[in-house]
Image (tube, rainbow, N blue to C red):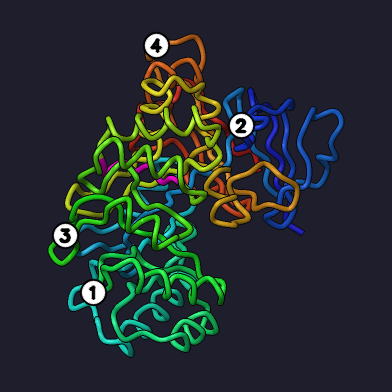
Amino acid sequence: MKKLVIRGIGQILTGKLEQPLADGDCLVAIDGRITAWGAEKDLDCEGATTLVDAKGVTLAPGLIDSHVHPVVGDYTPRQQQLHWIDSTLHGGVTTLISAGEVHMPGRPKDIVGLKAMAIASQRWYENFRPSGVKVHAGAPVIEHGMVEQDFQELAAAGVKLLGEVGLGTVKDGKTARQMVEWARKYGIQSTIHTGGPSIPGSGLIDADMVIETGTDVIGHINGGHSALPDDQIICLCESCKAAFEIVHNGNERAAVLALNTARELGKLDQVILGTDGPAGSGVQPLGILRMIAMLSAFGNVPAELAFCFGTGNTARQRKLDVGLIEVGYSADFVLLDQAQHSGGKTMLDSVRLGNLPGVAMTIIDGVVTSGRSRNTPPAQRLPEQIL
């Protein structure tokens, strides 16, 4: 039995909009799963195989990036960059979700080839976790000629995601909706490209097509990169029950509009975060933290709620066992503290002012995966791994 005990926690962010902060200075996990948290004196902390003294910093669920474009291992040909996933871990992200492996050179567009690549992508990230990061990949882009049996075969092989609808040859709502319904029938979740073209071969996806297609996630509702007109963004927020995905590689003004609209409609639980990288804008290791700080500062959202957009909201919308401080969930955490010399009295105050926190440690499945981040500004305090 492997037992993780984290003591000396300053505050706990739960990832839950309904209760974003939890009481307690200690958390226990056994065999990579959360078992208890609260006051150290009330918990069974004996027999720890890994013991971390948090030194008063904040513990949060590991951040989730809902929209990435991985290819193979920890390499992206889009930017000719190695170790981008390891760098993202240093931004507090412990889980990545593919919106399609679209930057693979020579990406196959025939049905046999696209299914083969999706299955291979799912397998190699299942078998290889760069720096411990969980990568949910194998997201085929739908093409004309696919039939229901193709989705059945993909699901049977372990594929659980579709790449962005609209990045392939299927660009009409009626055809896309049929394929999305087939995918959903076999437990495959779907995302749609929203806004203007992002790469050669993609095209405009407007609000009418998003609504007609009926995907589970409205990919980059703030544009990837070009956003839809304001009235269409508002229409999507009003009309759709799908997740509203706000991304780093989008329009910041449109991001705040989508957030404000979601809040006015009582739909903050549908807001999730992604980076949409690697892409033409590059790799954004701190993209999720930047979105949390930006939306808190300009969207008039308390920082503890903004953290939920990049943790528990995404976990619930994506049906994952990460992103929440919940018994039985994966022991994936990021330990954060106020950055040195940043404004605000506390870490959350500082984030509310638009500042990035310092990542002091990450933990995945109960195993310490990184210490002080090489990418964030330095945290004021550093946890110590005692065992």
The kind of secondary structure element at disc 3 is loop
* Residue at 52% in and 48% down: 314
Q: Which residue is mark 1?
A: 169
The kind of secondary structure element at disc 2 is strand
Residue 316: percent from the left, percent from the top? 59, 50
Residue type at mark 3: give it: Ile
> Mark 4 vs mark 3: which is more N-terminal?
3
Which circle, 3 or 1, is nearer the viewer? 1
Q: Which residue is mark 2?
A: 13
Q: Which residue is mark 4?
A: 343
Can residue 148 be found in the magenta stretch?
Answer: no
User: Residues in magenta?
Assistant: 244-250
> Mark 4 vs mark 1: which is more N-terminal?
1
Q: CA distance from mark 3 to mark 1?
A: 13 Å
Image quarter hosting the C terminus: top right
Q: CA distance from mark 4 to mark 3?
A: 39 Å
Marks 2 & 3, CB-CB < 8 Å contact: no
> Mark 3 vs mark 1: which is more N-terminal?
1
Residue type at mark 2: give it: Leu
Q: Which of the two residues, 357 or 221, is positioned nearer the viewer here? A: 221
Q: Which mark is residue 199?
A: 3
> Mark 1 vs mark 2: which is more N-terminal?
2
Residue type at mark 1: give it: Thr
Q: CA distance from mark 2 to mark 3?
A: 37 Å
The kind of secondary structure element at disc 4 is loop
The kind of secondary structure element at disc 1 is loop
Whether 10 is drawn above or below 93: the answer is above
Image quarter hosting the N terminus: bottom right
